[in-house]
Amino acid sequence: MRHYSTFPHEQLTRIISKIGVPCINFLTSLTLKYVNVTGELLEHCLSNCPVLEKLHVARSQSLVRLKISGLSLQLKYLHIINCTQIKSIDIFAPNLKSFGFVGPRIELYVNYAPCLVDVLIGGIYPVRISYLFCPLSNYLSQLQCLMLDICNFNDDNLEFPELQGLLNLRRLEVRVAACDDGSLLGLIPLIEATHVLHKFSLEVTIRTS
């Protein structure tokens, strides 16, 4: 069994806010796994770490809402993975190139991400991930790499009704967890929506009945 750590919010914010802490001023990458952090704490980190480019949070049970916003943000990589309590992510990030989300159904707002070229999305069964393409619709034409993590224990999870206009997609990676009698035909419209695809990889994990 994994043990979770919880950041002492008040102490950490005081440390981060303290002027003249070199390790904070020059922090470029922050990865937190099995650490309970709130959206407020992560937003505080972003506002006080001026050159932070990478933020990766996995399996935090305290992360509920996250707002990434600021014209001066240097953030290029944002991945939120398997944070089961999260309800919303709001993004305004002029330098963001890579966005990844795997988790429950959420409200996703991608208000401004002109540099976005790399996306990973996945859902926790029985969530259909196709709903995430609607808030990403303004950026589909500029994507170069798309990775999908799908739990396909019913065929509906492989439908992509919102997907079109992947004009610059060069790499498509799909990971599917499926029953032994499941169908992968739902991937055909996804592949047909691409125009300059260079690499397609498919990884299937079968769960026997």
Image (tube, grey):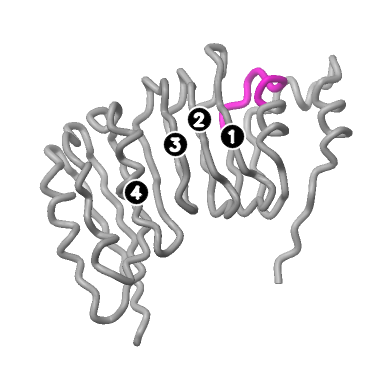
Residue at x 67% of width, y 53% of height: 61
Give, as a single range, the part of the protein colored magenta: 46-54
Which residue lies under the disc numbered 3?
A: 108
Give the amino acid type for the residue marked by disc 4 in the picture. Met
Farthest bottom residue in view: 209
Closer to the eye: label 4 or 1? 1
Query: How much space separates mark 1 and mark 2, taking CA atoms?
Result: 6 Å
Give the amino acid type for the residue marked by disc 3 in the picture. Leu
Residue 90: mark in rendering:
2
Residue 147: mark in rendering:
4
Lower position in the chain sequence, tag 2 or tag 4: 2
Name the spot of residue 174 as percent of width and height, x first.
30, 56
Closer to the eye: label 2 or 4? 2
Give the amino acid type for the residue marked by disc 2 in the picture. Asp
Name the spot of residue 145 as percent of width and height, x first.
31, 40
Query: How much space separates mark 4 and mark 1, taking CA atoms?
Result: 22 Å
